[in-house]
Amino acid sequence: MLSKETILLLEDIERRIDVETEEDYIAQWKKFLDKKFEGDIFIPERKKLSKPELEVKHININDALNSYDLMLRRELEGVSHSLDSEVANLAIRANYGTGIMTSMFGAEIFTMPREADTLPTTRSVNDTGWIKAKLEKGLPEVNSGFALNVFEFGEFCKEVFSKYPKIEKYVKVYHPDLQGPLDICELLWGGEMFYSMFDEPEVVHGMLNLVTDTYTMVMEKWFGLYKPEEINPHWGSLWHKGTILLRNDSAMNISKDMFEEFSKPYDNRLLNHFGGGCMHFCGRGDHYSEVFSEMPMLNSINMSQPQYNDMEKIYKNTVDKGIMILAFSKEWAEKDKVREGGFNHLLSSF
């Protein structure tokens, strides 16, 4: 059931969406992603800005976790701000943190203190015997853990948005944060996973295979609710070609050879199965960038913390090979655009 406050916010957003403006904004992204952009750094520009007509009270994430109405209002707060932003997209997600997949396997959900207003996660088990038992058990139930909330919230949004034609068309419900196979495995298993890569690699591969199958099962169900389009938004700052955005933060902890063995095969399986996509990583990724540059269905990357990377190595394995860099640091992009060959018109910032 929708609260009065959420209805008022929906009505405000529906009034403020300008069809011509949003069509133009999406067309800018499409031109860039189709590799027809001719500038140095792509930064989208919403030509007509619209300020909110009502004050939006911020919803604490701890409250939103227990109410689909509050979760929707919290997500729509971002949409309201985006309509008054030249660069931000109109997109929301079922925002249940990094522990969606791990909670399906029975990991304990950990909710942050209320004052942190930060997404929940799950506790790692750090028990290889427990992992082996999960391997024996096989695929978890598709509606277990936070996945139940994800699907119910997705259905809730679909029903609500059907009553608001412009919101239904222009406010995208992008796929939930399922992380990526290696990240899921580490979040579930904990630091013991890295020891097991040497001591019992077959167990690590077994778990990565199970996690990849589970990811496929969950994402196929999600795409049954929200069919992906030719280009798809993520976060508030980017659109990408392909259907999925994989997270590979855990890869910063392993070598290039280990990435090739323990991450690339499973990432490739998902990218191939779902028709390509983007890869995100925090921290250092230059050391395995040559490996991911060889993944044929990887269209783009999104990275943070360029200061921890040899960016020339990153550029040589992305923009110089036709792989885009999305939502990159404007400061670093401006500094590096003078490199030989520039960015080949394949880098976006905000």
Image (cartoon, rainbow, N blue to C red):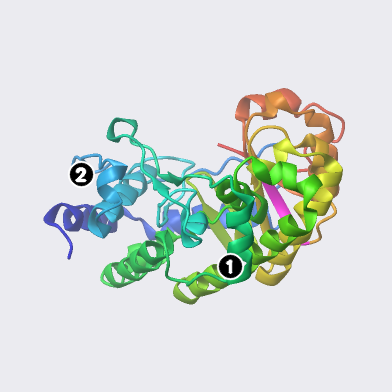
Q: Is residue 306 visible?
A: yes
Count how many numbered circles sit on residues in the image: 2
Residue 291 badge: none
- Tell me the amino acid under the disc marked 2: Glu
Q: Measured from the top left, where is residue 51 in percent x and y?
A: 29, 41
Residue found 73% across the figure and 66% down from its top? 269
Where disc 2 sits, the SS reads: loop
Viewer-proximal residue, 216 or 23? 216
| 80 with respect to 169 (left or right) | left
Q: Quadrant of the N terminus?
A: bottom left
> Is 277 rendered above or below residue 111?
below
* Residue at the spot of label 2: 53
| Callout 1 crowding tier (Cα within 10 Å): few <14, some 14–19, many ≥20 | many
- Residue pushed farthest left? 4
Residue found 40% across the figure and 45% down from its top? 48
> Is 238 rendered above or below residue 178?
above
| Callout 2 crowding tier (Cα within 10 Å): few <14, some 14–19, many ≥20 | few
- Residue pushed farthest bottom? 224
Q: Is residue 347 visible?
A: no
* Region in magenta: 297-301
* Residue at the spot of label 1: 214
